[in-house]
Image (spheres, rainbow, N blue to C red):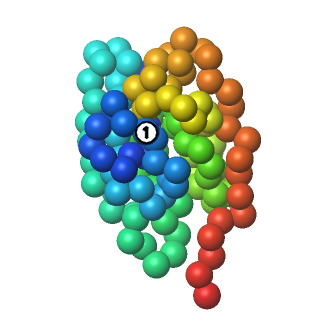
Amino acid sequence: MKIGIALMEKNIEKDINQTFARAPYFAIYNSDNKEVVYFDNAAKDASGGAGVKAAQFFVDNNVDAIIAYRLGENAVQVLTKSNIKLFAPREELTAINNINLLIDNELNTLVDIHSGYHHG
């Protein structure tokens, strides 16, 4: 399973970033080989549509699941259309701890969906 997360640093031993689309970095963790690959988030500085751009990044990288604190409606539409499952992290735990909980089927489905942050 490929799991996507948003991070403040390129380190899964740290916390998951509170914001999804505006996080400085993304990571994709492959549970089959325990490999993690880090990416700079190209969507973070977008003037609009950052959530959709961030979501499309994970779709394009064939992730199976996302762990995030909250997502916008448009990002959720992009992710769920591609059958990507959405999970809420446990706040007191690091990214890798949350990844391990997901692998063990111990994370709840994400319910914090907002209308998005629109500029204008």
The image shows residue 63 at horizontal and vertical percentages of: 44, 35
Horizontal and vertical percent position of residue 48: 51, 75
Query: Residue 23, position in %: x, y?
Result: 41, 56
- Please name whichever residue, 114 or 92, is drawn nearer the observer in this view of the structure: 92
The picture quadrant where one finds residue 27 is top left
Q: Quadrant of the N terminus?
A: top left
The residue under label 1 is 15
Question: What residue is drawn where x is 61% and y is 52%?
Answer: 71
The crowding category of the residue bearing disc 1, from other C-alpha atoms within 10 Å (few below 14, some 14 to 19, many at least 20), is: many
Q: Quadrant of the C terminus?
A: bottom right
Residue 2 visible in the picture = no
At label 1, which amino acid type do we have? Asp
Residue 13 is at least partly visible in this image: yes
Given residues 26 and 56, the one toward you in this image is 26
Q: Nearer the viewer, residue 50 or 8?
A: 8
Q: Is residue 30 left or right of residue 4?
A: left
Residue at the far bottom in the pictured view: 120
- Secondary structure of the residue carrying numbered label 1: loop
Q: Quadrant of residue 15?
A: top left
Horizontal side, residue 16 vs residue 116: left or right: left
Residue pictured at 59% horizontal, 31% vertical: 90
7 over 94 or under it: above or below: below
Q: How many marks?
A: 1
